[in-house]
């Protein structure tokens, strides 16, 4: 990724979790044990095994920890605790859709078959009968960790597929389908809120000449650097997409015509004021930009296709009038009937 902000690269389910955050969650454990001596013993074991330990003395505190966004995915719960016992904590964990699976190891002094069945049916994944051997505990924890590692790999694969479906592989920007969908959402929101809305259609001037002269690898490098500069030049809540080839679409929520021109000129200068460094030397690049906007509380119905068409026509006007310039669609043509 080329320094594109989280807002601009957010996939359908939100930004992909960082590997660091994922590792922290997987290498964390919650211990709930009311016996202070045994709790400290468990803490020392898990710390020796390189786990980040959160230790509490009752079920109510355990449940409070498990409701946090960064809660450990591995929980070691004593069955018998004052107030809320381990069985009740298990039931609450399984009754709540938390997105990620929590692996629960239940510690119990009960060894009756019916008690074991009750614990497993309440949602425990495994159990150990006290007193137990430290090596057996470590082996059972490792078994749980394998399941959590598998879950993490499946989630990563799903996130990668979702990201790839909505983003351009070369630039990391929203792809054409995704940026149009985002524009449609903003148009619908604007119909309800009456806020201003602006779009910019822009493409790289004489990009074919860059490809023909220097080759497609250099052309790709230019596209990536233009992407990076566009991402830096917009506001955090604006969205940038690769519309096709060397063409980009930028959506500016809450932006009227006057501010849209300011934003477009800022983007134009981001590209034109400094040549792009490549392996074949510096290449001067410019943009032509076509703008369409609708003002706050404007009464006409905003038509998404007409909106895009107007920005596209303004882009062609910018090219016809010399390139490296900003042109605006007439206000009366920025809306549809």
Image (cartoon, rainbow, N blue to C red):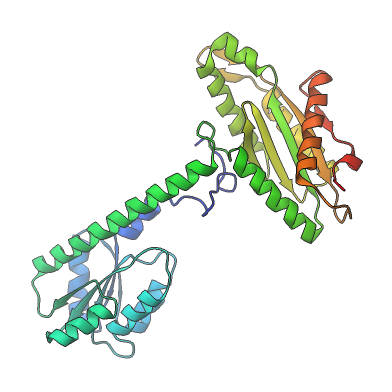
User: Where residue 117 sits in the image (x, y, percent)?
Assistant: 20, 82
User: Where residue 68 sits in the image (x, y, percent)?
Assistant: 43, 69
Q: In the image as oriented, which residue stretches furthest toward the front?
A: 337
> How many marks can you see?
0
User: Where residue 189 sits in the image (x, y, percent)?
Assistant: 73, 57
Q: Looking at the picture, tell me which residue is in the foreground, 218 or 35.
A: 218
Q: Is residue 282 above or below residue 95?
A: above
Using the rendered view, name the quadrant where residue 47 is placed: bottom left
Q: Is residue 213 above or below residue 324?
A: above
Q: Looking at the picture, tell me which residue is in the foreground, 169 or 107.
A: 169
**Is 14 on the left-hand or right-hand side of 45?**
right
Residue at point 56% right, 19% down? 219
User: Where residue 236 sits in the image (x, y, percent)?
Assistant: 64, 47
Residue 35 visible in the shown view:
no
Residue at point 42% right, 74% down? 96
Using the rendered view, name the quadrant where residue 210 is placed: top right
Q: Is residue 291 above or below residue 155?
A: above
**Is 233 on the left-hand or right-hand side of 298?**
left
Residue at point 25% right, 59% down? 147
Residue 132 visible in the shown view:
yes
Q: In the image as oriented, which residue stretches furthest toward the right?
A: 332
Residue at point 54% right, 36% down? 168
**Is 43 on the left-hand or right-hand side of 307?**
left
**Is 238 on the left-hand or right-hand side of 320?**
left
Q: In the image as oriented, which residue stretches furthest toward the top?
A: 213
Q: Looking at the picture, tell me which residue is in the foreground, 196 or 52.
A: 196
Q: Is residue 138 above or below residue 271?
A: below
């Amino acid at each position: 990724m080329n320094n594109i902000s989280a807002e601009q690269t957010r996939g359908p389910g939100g930004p992909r979790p960082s590997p660091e955050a994922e590792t922290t969650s997987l290498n964390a454990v919650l211990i709930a044990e009311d016996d202070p001596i045994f709790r400290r013993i468990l803490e020392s074991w898990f710390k020796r095994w390189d786990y980040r330990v959160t230790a509490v003395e009752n079920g109510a505190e355990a449940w409070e920890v498990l409701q946090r966004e960064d809660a450990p995915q591995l929980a070691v719960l004593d069955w018998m605790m004052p107030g809320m016992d381990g069985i009740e904590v298990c039931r609450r964990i399984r009754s709540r859709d938390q997105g990620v699976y929590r692996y629960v190891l239940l510690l119990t002094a009960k060894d009756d078959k019916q008690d074991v069945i009750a614990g497993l049916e309440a949602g425990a994944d495994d159990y150990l009968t006290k007193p137990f051997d430290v090596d057996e505990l470590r082996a059972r924890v490792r078994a749980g960790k394998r399941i959590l590692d598998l879950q993490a790999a499946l989630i990563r694969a799903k996130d990668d597929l979702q990201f790839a479906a909505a983003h351009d592989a070369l630039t990391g920007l929203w792809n054409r389908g995704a940026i149009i969908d985002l524009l449609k959402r903003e148009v619908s929101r604007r119909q309800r809120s009456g806020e201003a809305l602006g779009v910019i259609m822009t493409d790289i001037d004489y990009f074919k000449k860059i490809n023909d002269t220097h080759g497609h690898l250099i052309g790709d490098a230019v596209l990536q650097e233009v992407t990076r500069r566009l991402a830096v030049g917009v506001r955090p809540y604006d969205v940038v997409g690769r519309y096709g080839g060397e063409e980009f679409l930028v959506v500016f929520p809450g932006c009227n015509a006057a501010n849209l021109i300011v934003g477009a000129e800022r983007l134009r200068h981001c590209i034109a004021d400094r040549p792009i460094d490549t392996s074949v030397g510096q290449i001067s690049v410019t943009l032509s930009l076509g703008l369409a906007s609708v003002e706050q509380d404007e009464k006409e119905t905003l038509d998404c296709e007409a909106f895009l068409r107007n920005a596209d026509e303004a882009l062609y006007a910018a090219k016809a009038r010399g390139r490296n310039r900003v042109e605006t669609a007439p206000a009366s043509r920025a809306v549809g009937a």
